[in-house]
Amino acid sequence: MDLKSGLPFWLIKNGLSENYERLEQDIETEVLIIGSGITGALVAHFLCENNVKCVIADRRMESTGSTTASTAQLQYEIDEYLYDLIEKVGEEDAVKAYKMCLESITTLEKIVKQLKIDVDFKRVPSLYLASDAKGKKQLEKEFEIRKKHGLPVQYLTEEMLLSEYNIKRKAALYNNESAQVDTYKFCQAILDYHRKNSGLKVYSHTNIVEIKSKKDAITAYTDKEIKIKAKKIVAAPGFESENLLDEKVMQLESTYVLVSQPMHPDELWKEKCLIWETARPYLYIRTTEDNRIMVGGFDEPFQDPKKRDALMDKKNKDILKRFKTFFPESKIEIDFYWCGTFGGTKDGLPYIGEHKKHPNMYFALGYGGNGITFSVIAAEMIKDMYLGKQTEENIFRFDR
């Protein structure tokens, strides 16, 4: 399936990887990671840091799946309000999930510093805007529950929003713990680092079509009848992980994104903070290092790539129209646009860990709008599972 279409800005900006290697013969490794996107790269990072021999296989060119379509707004908020998540999974697990997302942003920052890589990681504040009177009530309720559990949050009134940000909305939640990054560049940097320093092997255009598990080993077979034998397999090819499962655990959505021509700094809003809203589907806005505006949303239930792509022109117009309700004086002009498909879950939380019908495998899937923060959580958890350490897998288990 085509995961995206159009011209993803990150791929145009950074170009394809110069590393290209196909698997040509049978091999053995400790851990086989299926998927070379940001989740697979982070899993490899944590395993390699613990001297675990890893191999990555991807049926595409490395890192060119959904990772190139990510807008990489790093927020601790989950698509589900905390008070709603509490109703679904209980207060302890809901709060823990929020706090794990918060911690994951700091973990990403530490990785960037540790590997000494330039991936446009930047701490920026976040504004969560009330789209209407109903949204204001939701934010008031959300503010109280976050404040109760010590999560970073401030409540901004309509007057404060107008005077500080020149945005006309009923209210907003503000925090200064968010961040943004060039996800594709980040993914490539992690893979390159561990290729050079940890012996990581990454095989492109290597399509896994069958997996057979025995008591103490598991073997993946490619469409070229080549075998990869491992102790464990990590399934991290985005929502395509679901192809390995008997049951349907995700709902597929398509999201639409456009990127402006570079703007003058004076044309941008205060702090260049991340912006999103209470309306569903919501609009999300950020800036890039060269002062472009990246804005997306108007998510649509996925049917097939042709129907998804046919909506792009209409979605671009809808996105611009909504953006102008935030910034009516903006002279934004489109330079790039694309759409991508992602998987969400009924409670907004991913599925991470083992599945009773698939021995010797770990899964990482169902990220929704929190792709990268959940990727960090999944990568650390899978590393701990492999090393026999205790994890918070109960929160993200398949049978929750």
Image (cartoon, rainbow, N blue to C red):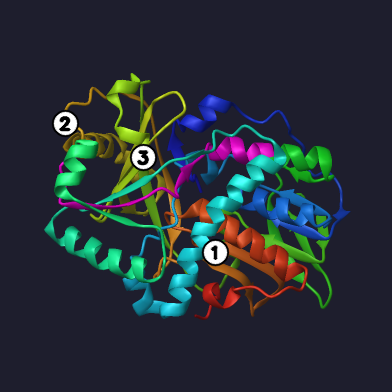
Element class at badge 3: loop
State how far apart marks 3 and 1 are (Cα): 34 Å
Look at label 1 and name its amino acid: Glu
In the image, what residue occupies the spot 29% across and 41% down? Answer: 311
Region of the chain picked out in magenta, as a range: 167-189
Element class at badge 1: helix
Disc number for residue 328: 2
Q: Position of residue 13 (x, y in %)?
A: 52, 25
State how far apart marks 1 and 2 are (Cα): 42 Å
Give whichever of 93, 68 is nearer the camera: 93
Residue 366: say if magenta: no
Question: Could you classify mark 3 by the number of other residues whose Cα lies within 10 Å: few (under 14), some (14-19), or many (20 or more)?
Answer: many
The residue pinned by badge 3 equals 273
Q: Nearer the observer, disc 2 or disc 3? A: 3
In the image, what residue occupies the spot 32% across and 72% down? Answer: 84
Ranked by sequence position, the earlier of labels 2 and 3 is: 3
Question: Could you classify mark 1 by the number of other residues whose Cα lies within 10 Å: few (under 14), some (14-19), or many (20 or more)?
Answer: many
Disc number for residue 242: 1
Q: Position of residue 198 (x, y in %)?
A: 83, 45
